[in-house]
Image (cartoon, coloured by chain):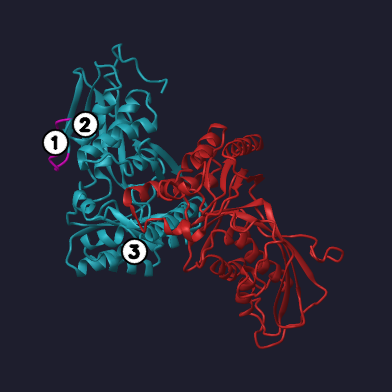
Chain colours: A red, B cyan
Amino acid sequence: MENKLDLNSPYEMDFSAIVKVQAPATVANMVCGFDILGFAVNEPYDQMQIRFQEKPGITIINDDDYNLPTDPEKNVAGAALLAMMEELPSNIGFELTIKKLIKPGSGVGSSAASSAGAVAAANRLLHHCFSKQDLVRFAMNGEKVASGVKHADNIAPCIYGGVTLIRSIFPLDIVALTAPPLFVTIVHPQIEVKTSDARSILQQKVLLKDAIKQWGNIAGLVAGLLQSDYALIGRSLEDVLIEPVRSILIPGFDQIKAQSKEAGALGGGISGSGPSIFMLSETEATAQKVAGVMHQIYNNLKLDHHTYVTTINHSGVRFVDSFITEDAAL
Amino acid sequence: MENKLDLNSPYEMDFSAIVKVQAPATVANMVCGFDILGFAVNEPYDQMQIRFQEKPGITIINDDDYNLPTDPEKNVAGAALLAMMEELPSNIGFELTIKKLIKPGSGVGSSAASSAGAVAAANRLLHHCFSKQDLVRFAMNGEKVASGVKHADNIAPCIYGGVTLIRSIFPLDIVALTAPPLFVTIVHPQIEVKTSDARSILQQKVLLKDAIKQWGNIAGLVAGLLQSDYALIGRSLEDVLIEPVRSILIPGFDQIKAQSKEAGALGGGISGSGPSIFMLSETEATAQKVAGVMHQIYNNLKLDHHTYVTTINHSGVRFVDSFITEDAAL
């Protein structure tokens, strides 16, 4: 915090500096860890580049085909940067180029990658004057633009890497959890599940006895991760509250889950609010087998889909060839 | 499991063997860990002694002033032993002597100490033919006699020692959690809170948003314990669901909690279903200061009470002078 810039003095910008980042996809609502546990993966990721511009404010350049807004207040990355700029001298201007490789609406933290990537990249330009927790705080403004709610369970793992616990959102309390090596299989069926729909079908009240089952599993999952106990992780990956309601929005969900576990997956569930489904495995061979299972089931359902086999990303937003000349446009 | 005795062959009992144990008090419902987290303490504890008797069946001798039933089916230790004996040859007989030092109804696992102590002692007589999980399973029958419900959050820490997670009760899944050194202050106000009353005032349904806060705290508490992060343990020791309802049954609760934290305690709450209150501290000096706070508050309320300053018991039921001659009656 002591590194923050003096709001009353103009900042001397280095216009030759360019920061390029890969902002990873993330899986929120980690089964029993609804709203509190998420993790980052190594693929897919967004590519972003930031540099100072003479004009104060933000210019957004979209280098992809998603036609996302370029008005900073309506763009998730722009909203995150605007929140950051409230704590910066007023002469600062950023030019942000975004090449989205994570499809919006896929349920693997596409908006979080944009928000988190933008503020992490800007923070590097600013010689890391903000803490990771500050970056999460700024990036949550992007989530608010995307879904109307400030939530951190994609943002936090995107910035911290690994598996992160959001113990509390107000006040913000993020705990990075160690985890043993895990392979992640993700399938993204090409259907739309609106986060607002996924939220609205949840009951506001739940049975205490179900909540107790859920927090037993959460405690087991955290212990399994920290103690590298794969069997315990597997036993704990059960969600008795959210998944039974939300999974009806995702074709083939029950079949994919059951057959993935038969193929050796430890367990898994809905990624974020869907429609993507993720499964965790102890070995790459199992994760590949699980991808085959998913592929087969969606082929049978004649549903377009993408599968990824990846690993947990322990570094979060990654700086790549920080000063680019030849490939400035990504 | 392979060690179990042949049910169809009489067991050759060693009538000279005597096993004496200390069965520790336990704190269940560890704040946010309602129904799933408990821990054992080094004081108080029950003293128990077991030996074989010629006559098949169970003889219970109460060596204290509590006038507890001696009919094995109505005595919690007897019920636990009866469950064990269903998996033993039919010629076996036990004589169990119990000296209760943990006051029944105090909320620190008095019935669990009797049940767990009895089966742990018997298991030693039987050369440890049962696993710890078996012992928990047997001892839960004692809890059923005591409160009508088979629960394991006192039994499991009493048998395993330390902090234990009951991830699931059916099927039984117990996870021993490591914990950093912690000092425990317990105050037992001399009032009666019936477990059945404490259960009946709970709502069957809770708000999802409160349940999410609770499982964020549970995840934080487990991570804090496993990572020896005292500050995280402290921040996570909050119960938004059970304590607000149950604490109204315990005079002075809010004041004790607030002033204990002011005195430096990490946090704490109701022990079991009360009326005892426990607080965790990082140092013995703080734990003693907290005892002073509790003492002062109950003195002002003119309420009889006992306070204990103790530590987490990491061994569970303890075998003491296993073969006693001179002090056979405890």
**Circle 2: element type:** helix
Residue A115 vs B43, above or below: the answer is: below
Q: Position of residue A317 (x, y in %)?
A: 68, 60
Q: Are marks 2 and 1 in contact (CB under 8 Å)?
A: yes
User: Is residue A34 at all visible to an observer of this figure?
Assistant: yes
Specify start and end residues of the magenta stretch as a single range. Answer: B64-72
Q: CA distance from mark 2 to mark 3?
A: 37 Å
Q: Residue furthest front?
A: A302
Are dots 2 and 1 on a single chain?
A: yes
Query: Who is closer to the viewer here, B118 or A238?
Result: A238
Q: Which mark is residue A217?
A: none
Do tags 3 and 1 sit on the same chain? yes
- Kindly check if marks 2 and 3 are in contact, taking CB atoms under 8 A apart as contact: no
Whether residue B330 appears in this view of the structure is: no
Verify whether residue B68 appears in magenta.
yes
Q: Position of residue B289 (x, y in %)?
A: 35, 65
Identify the amino acid type marked 1: Pro
Q: Is residue B85 above or below residue A211?
A: above
Circle 2 residue: B78
Please give the residue where the numbered disc 3 appears in the rendered image. B290
Residue underneath mark 1: B69
Q: Where's the N terminus of chain B, which quadrant?
A: top left
How would you rate the neighbour count of disc 2 (Cα within 10 Å): few for under 14, some for 14-19, many for 20 or more?
A: many
The kind of residue on which mark 2 rests is: Gly
- Label 3 and label 1: CA atoms lie apart by 36 Å
